[in-house]
Each structure stands twice: as C-alpha cells, then as structure tokens.
Image (spheres, coloured by chain):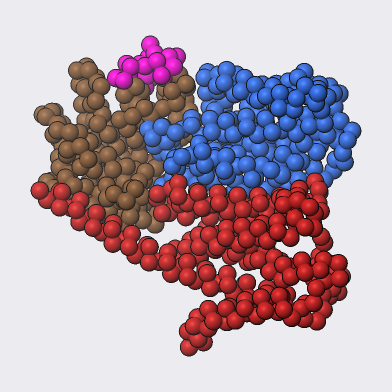
Chain colours: A blue, B brown, C red
Amino acid sequence: MFRVAWLVAKKDLRIELRSRVLLWQVVPFGAMALLLAGLALGPAHAGNSPAGPGLFYLVMLFVALLMINRSQVIEATPGTRASVATLGLDPAGVFLGKALALSIELWVSGLVLLAGTVLVLHTALHGAILALPSVLVTLIALALAGTLYGALTAGGEGASTLLPVLCLPAFAPLLIAGERSFSAALGTAGLWEWWVIVLVAVLAYGGVGILLYGVLEES
Amino acid sequence: MMSDPLVRLYGAVAFANGFPLLSGVDLELSPRSLIVVTGANGAGKTSLLRLLGGLLALSSGEGMVCGVDLAAGDLRQLRRRVGWLGHEGSFYADLSVKENLRFCAVALARPVTEIDAVLERVGLAARADTTTKQLSAGQRRRLGLAWLLLRRAELWLLDEPYASLDDQGRTFFDDLLGEVTNAGATVVVSAHDPLRNARLELRTIHLAGGRVKED
Amino acid sequence: MIKQLSQRLLGPVTLVLLVATIWLGLWVTPPDKIQGNLVRLLYVHPAIAWVALYVSFGTATIASALFLWRRTRSWVMDRVAHCAMEVSVVFIILTLITGSIWGRPTWGVWWAWDARLTSTAILGVLALGYLALRRANDDPTLRAKRSAVFAILSAINVPIIHFSVQWWKTLHQGATVFTSSRTLLVHGSMAWTLLISFVGFTLLFFWLLRARYRLEVERETNQRAALEQALIARQREGAL
C-alpha cells in the first residue's frame, strides 16, 4: 500500500512541477480571491479585520476545489484511465498517494495565501505563525476528504460542477474549525475543540478512503 | 491436445448510456493465438476489447477471461493480466517517455533496468527524456508498444494499433505480433479491414451490430 | 397475512394519526404559558425533524451500508437507500420551513445562525448532493456503489457538522420533551399530541417510502423493456 502511495504521490507531484498549474493558475486565483475579499469588506474594515482567518479559509476552500479537480483530471482521458486501470494498483495506496500529493500542493498554496492574509488583510504575523500547525493539519483533512469526493465524481457527467456540491457541505466543519483555531492563535477564541474536529475528520476520511476507495473505481 | 480457451463469452451483452454496445457476443479464443476483430464504425470492436480487459461491465450473458468471471470475479486481477493499447493517448502527457515507463514498471514490480532495452527496441531510445505531449502520434503509439513490452501481459488488447504508424512501424509491429504469440501470449487486434499479412497466422472475426457476424 | 394487513393499514392509520395530530394540536391542547399559540407548531416541527434527520437519513445510510457489504448486497438495498434519501429531502425542507416559521416570531428573523438550523441546512445540501451524484453516473453498479459511499460519508459527517456548528454558536432551545436526566417535561394532552405526531410522521415516512419504492420498481421495469427494445434493434442492425 505505502509503495503504491509513494509511487502515485511522486507521479502527481512531478506532473504538477511540469505543468505548473498550481503556480500559474491556482495561486494567482487564490491571491485575487483574497484581494476581492478585502474589497468586499470595504476600505474601513479590510485591514486588521476579525474576518481575516475566515476569509483565508474561504479562499483556501476554493483553491482546494480547483486542486481536487486537477488531481482527478490527470487521469481523466479515457486512454490514460484504461492504461492505469490495467496496472491493477492497490486502491488504498492510490488514495493515500493522491491525498499526500494534494496535501503538499495545498500546503504550498496555504503558505502563499497565509502570507497574503498578513500582507493584504493585516492579520497579525505572530498569530499567523502560531496558527501554522493547525492550518497544515486542516489542509491534510481537506486533502483526504477532497481525494475521496474527487473519486466519487470522476468520470461522471458534469464532474467538475458536481464536485463543489458534494465537497462544500463536508468542508463546512473544517472551515469552522480552521477559522476558530486561527482566531485562537490571534487570541480571540478557545482552541482544543477545534483540534478535535480536525483530527476526527482526518481519521474518518483517512479510514473510509483506505477501506472504500476501490469501490469508487469505474468498472 | 486442445488447450482450454483463454476467453469464453456466451451471449455477452454490454450497455452504456442505455445503448447496447455489445448485443450478444458468443466467442471462444485459444491461448497463443492472434485474432483480428474487424467491422464498420460502431460495430462494437473497441467495446469487445474493453470487455475482455475488464474495462467495460458485462450487463448480461456469461464471460470468462484468463480464468476470471466477468460477472462476479475480481476484475482488478484480470486487468493486471491484460495489456491495453487504446487509440487515444494512454499516458501521462506531462511525464517524459522514460518516466511513464518507470511508473508502469514500478507499479507492476518489473525491473526498471529493462526500460532502456525496451525503448531501444521500439525505436524511442533517443526520445527517452522527451515529454510525452511533445511526441508525434506515431511515436506515442510506439510508446504504447514499449508499455506493453514492459508489462509482459498474458492477453494483449490492441485497439486500431496500425493507426499513425509508418511503413517501418507497421513492419516492426507485425514482427512483434508474431513474436509475442510465439512466446505464449494471446493478441486481439481491432482493425477496420482484415489484415493482409502472409507472415502471420491469424483468425479474423467480423463484428456487426455488436455481435459476431463471421468467424 | 400480517404483512399484507400491515401494508393495507399503513395508509389509513397514517392518515388517522396525522388528522388526530392536527385536531389535538389546534383545538384540544392549551396554549403555552410562554409561547402562546406558537407552541402548536411544535406538534409538527420536532416530529418532521425526527423523520428528516434520523429515520429517513438513517434508513438511507443503513441500506447503503448493506449494499456495500457483499453478503447483503442487493438492488433492493440500493433502491431503498435512493428512495429514503428522496423522502429525506422533502422532510428536511419541511423541517427548515416549519423551523423558520417558528423562528420568525421567536427570534425575530427567518434564519438564525443556530447550530441545529445550520447543520440541518447542510444536511439538506448533502441529501441533494446524493441525488445529483446518482444522476451523474449511468452505469447502475457504479452509481449504486458511489452513492452508497457518499451516503455513509454523509452520515459520518452529520455528528462532525453538528458538533462543529454547536460549538461555534447555538440559539436553539435544548431538550424539549425530556431533560438530560430523562425526566418528562411535557404533560397531559400536550404529551399525547406529541407522541401521536411522532408516530404519525414516522408512519408517513414509511408510507411515502413504500410508494416511492413501487414507483422506482415500475420505472426500472419500463427501463428494462426499453433496453430490450434497444438490444433487439441492435441485433437487427447486425443481421442486415
């Protein structure tokens, strides 16, 4: 399982490094969304707003949706799907590998957007640094959930539009938990229960993915 | 002594989007044979190959391929034993030729040391580090062959393999087909017209309306 | 015999219980000391919410799990899961509407950022997502497997969503019928009306589920006939 996971993760990351979709498309989109969030708050409220952590996670969710879609599109052409299917890879390994690659891609986007939040929305730098561990773990939960939901929609009709409908309700608790723990790092909220939510999500999605990812494969 | 058939289909029907791609195929294929499936566009050639590879679900009828029951067996086991060459791009376009083959080799636990020899054989050694999307259609087809050579599959399923190949490529391909069947593999090739190559001993099956019309 | 009788009686008994709920709720029970006549809405709202969140979603989840489990896998389970989820959507929408009507005079707004309200709305989107997912896949086996996995994921999500929103913020009143130590808080005609309402709406769910299931079987029969026609036409195409 771990051998396959490593193989799949390396392949997905190598493709990302070559295509630079994250660098040239997704990160600029996230940066623009963050700017738009500031504009939506208005000049009086954009700087040092208590909404900063929430807006960071909201933008992060949209970025995650793009990246999840991208992670599935890699195998979207019928020929590639057929060729890869004939390799008979262990589904649990494929799930973990794709989730690992997606986590790393989300970490990269997350770090850029976190810096953007400090820069544009004037969120306190020390708070952002303190929030970093919770951000990274929340992004792992997003990656695990996203890999599962991405596989649920893969190859189906309107896969890219169906994905947000399935993902966003499941992402809601992660958005809340992420926002609260970020705010806690800024000194405005309690902390422990939000770690519980994120860790339960990591375990639940990881467990279901390892057990059931194979069921989602096309026949 | 007659060997057991590698493929057995009885009244095999496969639907997709409410359309019967295959409408009752009866077929037996012996091991170590070369079979050409011909037919007009939409006759069901690709669908038959996909069914044999465990890539299309059997809707009704019976099917046994490489000892795996198509209706109730573990299709993942079957897929590991077939080699598939489709007429669309079958690889990761952003990986190089060598990286694609390395992925295949590691996934199947084959030695990666074989890659260079295989590339040499299909005439892609000079293109080993080229990104796959930069290859011509014919070169991609050769990469497909390299992928298959690396797999050492029991059942080769080749969908329109001659498309985009030049004369040299076709000759190479004919030689290869003879070689792999002699080595023990079964090869099923789909083509619009019957192959006219005297060097190969082959069986031609003609499909029409999703069924075998002539054998 | 008993099965036939219960099937025949399901509709009439449901109707009688629902009519009794309306009669008791509107004319027999007294107004509440604090809420006045607004309390009458609470004879239907908790029962509808109970069916939406527990009975129908629970039925869909259990049927989905039984479909995924190889030993109990059957198309009956897939159909039950699908039909229960459709009925669930109706009950979730009714829960939100009745809750909103109650919330307007109580909280002063149609929508409040309350834990139960928010998590019910999210659950509604999950149920709609389940139905959208079914429409996106044509292969019956793949559709059944994927939607079953989604139903299970949604069920796992329900407590996560609930606790996250509850910890985030809550306005909704606490336990109404029982205290946490299981002491009954509602008495007399009010308690009876609530009980009848819960039983009535639960039976309504099973009545709707049965009707929808029959419709689904009929739809599948028609679809099979259409597929057979398509198969014959395709075979003729080959014979030409």
- Name above or below for residue A13 compared with residue A184: above
Q: Position of residue C177 (x, y in %)?
A: 80, 71
Instruction: Using residue A121 as the reference point, say whether residue A98 is left or right of it.
Output: left
Kindly indicate the quadrant of the structure image that contains residue B104: top left
Viewer-proximal residue, C59 or B136? C59
Main SS category, magenta section: helix
* Residue lying at 17% horizontally and 38% vertically, measured from the top left: B40
* Residue lying at 52% horizontally and 42% vertically, measured from the top left: A162
- Name above or below for residue C211 compared with residue A212: below
Viewer-proximal residue, B190 or A150? A150
* Residue lying at 13% horizontally and 34% vertically, measured from the top left: B194
Viewer-proximal residue, B93 or C88? C88
Q: Where is residue B130 in the image (x, y as percent from the top left)?
A: 43, 14
Q: Position of residue A172 (x, y in %)?
A: 69, 43
- Report the residue that reaches farthest toward the right: A187
In the image, the segment drawn in magenta is B118-139
Instruction: Using residue A174 as the reference point, say whether residue A183 is left or right of it.
Output: right
Q: Where is residue A217 in the image (x, y as percent from the top left)?
A: 47, 45
Q: Does the magenta stretch include residue B126?
A: yes
Q: In which quarter of the image is the N terminus of chain A?
A: top right
Residue A134: in sight, yes or no? Answer: no
Instruction: Using residue A107 as the reference point, say whether residue A196 is left or right of it.
Output: right
